[in-house]
Image: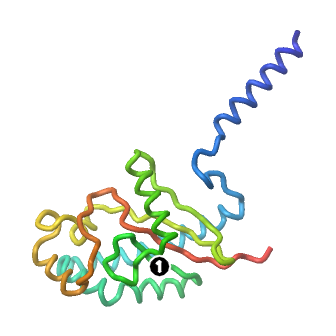
Amino acid sequence: MRKINIGFIGIALMVFVSLNCVNTDKKAILSADEQYYLDMGKSVAASTQAVLGSNLKTAMGKGGPENALEFCNAKAIPLTDSMAIVLNTAIKRVSDKARNPDNKANAFEKSIIAAQIKRLENGGEPKAQIHEVKGEMVGYYPIITNGLCLQCHGKVNQAVQQKTFDKINDFYPQDEAMGYDVNQIRGMWVVEMQKRKL
């Protein structure tokens, strides 16, 4: 009788564990190697975001959103490229609604952004992803809007003042990056990492 109870408990435990480990999100369970690259890319993206954010805040403090736009127009991409050199990797910002055409997401990147937007709309948390692309490990890290972002990416005559909107049109006549609210997917950092030799 004791063996039956232990066996039954063992089977019940296995069923419970397997049901709770069902992978409802592709890539939810990562290999140790994938986790290594995901973490490394996250560190690169966070460092680059911190440097860019610090420079943007300084520019805002010196001359408001219009000055921040001048900084972004002249220095955001070169600054990102410099960080890539310092961090020995390739990093870029992309968006499905780009302000600068150089930041336009490709079809695969757009699919990841669309999935992240849907996830957020359904009450989930955006999640970083890792994929192998052309022999490199590529991490994708969502960029979420906050109040500061809305001064240049929010709704015109609400968060975005008319003079800021005019400056945006001067610098970016094909701008698509307006109308956001707080806590929306603005785009993502894409970090390309060479595979380590094992």
Q: Position of residue 125 (x, y in %)?
A: 45, 51
The structure residue drawn at horizontal position 44% and vertical position 68%, both measured from the top left corner, is: 188
The structure residue drawn at horizontal position 45% and vertical position 57%, both measured from the top left corner, is: 116
Q: Position of residue 96 (x, y in %)?
A: 39, 70
Name which residue type carries label 1. Lys
Q: Residue furthest front?
A: 107
Q: Quadrant of residue 80?
A: bottom left
Q: Quadrant of residue 76?
A: bottom left
| Label 1 residue SS | strand
Q: Position of residue 86 (x, y in %)?
A: 53, 86
Q: Label 1 crowding class (10 Å Cα cut-off): few <14, some 14-19, many 20+?
A: some
The structure residue drawn at horizontal position 23% and vertical position 72%, both measured from the top left corner, is: 152
Q: Position of residue 36 (x, y in %)?
A: 66, 65
Q: Quadrant of the C terminus?
A: bottom right
Question: What residue is shown with label 1?
Answer: 92
Q: Residue furthest top?
A: 1
Q: Is residue 148 above or below residue 15?
A: below
User: Viewer-proximal residue, 125 or 44?
Assistant: 125
Q: Is residue 21 left or right of residue 125?
A: right
Q: Is residue 19 above or below residue 110?
A: above
Q: Is residue 175 left or right of residue 131?
A: left
User: Viewer-proximal residue, 15 or 60?
Assistant: 15
The structure residue drawn at horizontal position 61% and vertical position 52%, both measured from the top left corner, is: 28
> In the rendered view, how is the structure colored?
rainbow
Q: Is residue 103 left or right of residue 107?
A: left
